[in-house]
Image: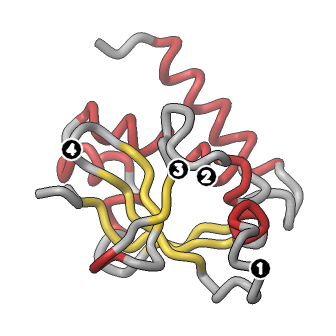
């Protein structure tokens, strides 16, 4: 059920995105295959359904409002459950959408070499990402 209050909240959030000073928020690029779906609300609803489109918008708002990926520290906390993937998806991060789907993204640039024990510092260095996929990483 979508109420008027929900769309007002989203509109306010979108306005806040535009008002954040440059460098004060996460920079987000979208991979070519996802660009149409993620930049057009109606296309997103057509491709993923209304519930999933809302969740995608919430995750994009959270990511855009972050100063760096460290805002989602510690890993797998909060509703986003942001975490670094392993195996075939090594170097990729994931945030929860609607089960079983995840939004996958990579740092736009390779973060600087840090002490291998300073995982939080690694997350702090990520200030720009590229969204690469929306998929079920477990299926």
Q: How busy is the neighbourhood of tag 3: few (under 14 within 10 Å), some, or many (20 plus)?
A: some
Q: Secondary structure at mark 3?
A: helix
First in sequence, mark 1 or 3: give its number. Answer: 3
Q: Secondary structure at mark 1?
A: loop
- Tell me the CA gap for discs 2 and 3: 5 Å
Asked whether 126 or 12 is in front, the reply is 126
Measured from the top left, where is residue 124 in percent x and y? 77, 64
Asked whether 138 or 65 is in front, the reply is 138
First in sequence, mark 2 or 1: give its number. Answer: 2
Which residue is disc 2 drawn over? 63
The answer to whether mark 1 and mark 4 are in CB contact below 8 A is no
The answer to whether mark 2 and mark 3 are in CB contact below 8 A is yes
Q: Image point 23% across, 38% down: which residue?
A: 99
Q: How busy is the neighbourhood of tag 2: few (under 14 within 10 Å), some, or many (20 plus)?
A: many
Measured from the top left, where is residue 109 in percent x and y? 64, 87
In the rendered image, the vertical position of residue 119 relative to residue 65, given as above or below: below
Which residue is disc 1 drawn over? 115
The answer to whether mark 4 and mark 3 are in CB contact below 8 A is no
Which label is found at residue 100? 4
Q: Find residue 116 and report its image quarter.
A: bottom right
- Tell me the CA gap for discs 1 and 3: 29 Å
Q: Image point 49% across, 19% down: which residue?
A: 6
- Tell me the CA gap for discs 4 and 3: 18 Å
Quarter the N terminus occupies: top left
Which residue is disc 3 drawn over? 60
- Tell me the CA gap for discs 2 and 1: 25 Å
First in sequence, mark 4 or 3: give its number. Answer: 3
């Amino acid at each position: 059920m979508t109420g008027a209050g929900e769309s007002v909240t989203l509109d306010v959030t979108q306005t806040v995105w535009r008002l954040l000073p440059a460098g004060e928020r996460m920079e987000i690029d979208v991979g070519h295959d996802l660009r149409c779906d993620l930049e057009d609300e109606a296309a997103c609803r057509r491709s993923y359904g209304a519930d999933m489109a809302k969740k995608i918008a919430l995750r994009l708002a959270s990511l855009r409002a972050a100063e760096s990926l460290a805002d989602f520290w510690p890993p797998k906390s909060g509703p986003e459950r942001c975490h670094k993937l392993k195996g075939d998806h090594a170097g990729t991060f994931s945030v929860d959408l609607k089960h079983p789907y995840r939004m996958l993204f990579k740092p736009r640039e390779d973060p600087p070499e840090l002490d291998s024990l300073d995982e939080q510092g690694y997350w702090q260095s990520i200030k720009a990402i590229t969204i690469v996929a929306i998929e079920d990483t477990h299926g």
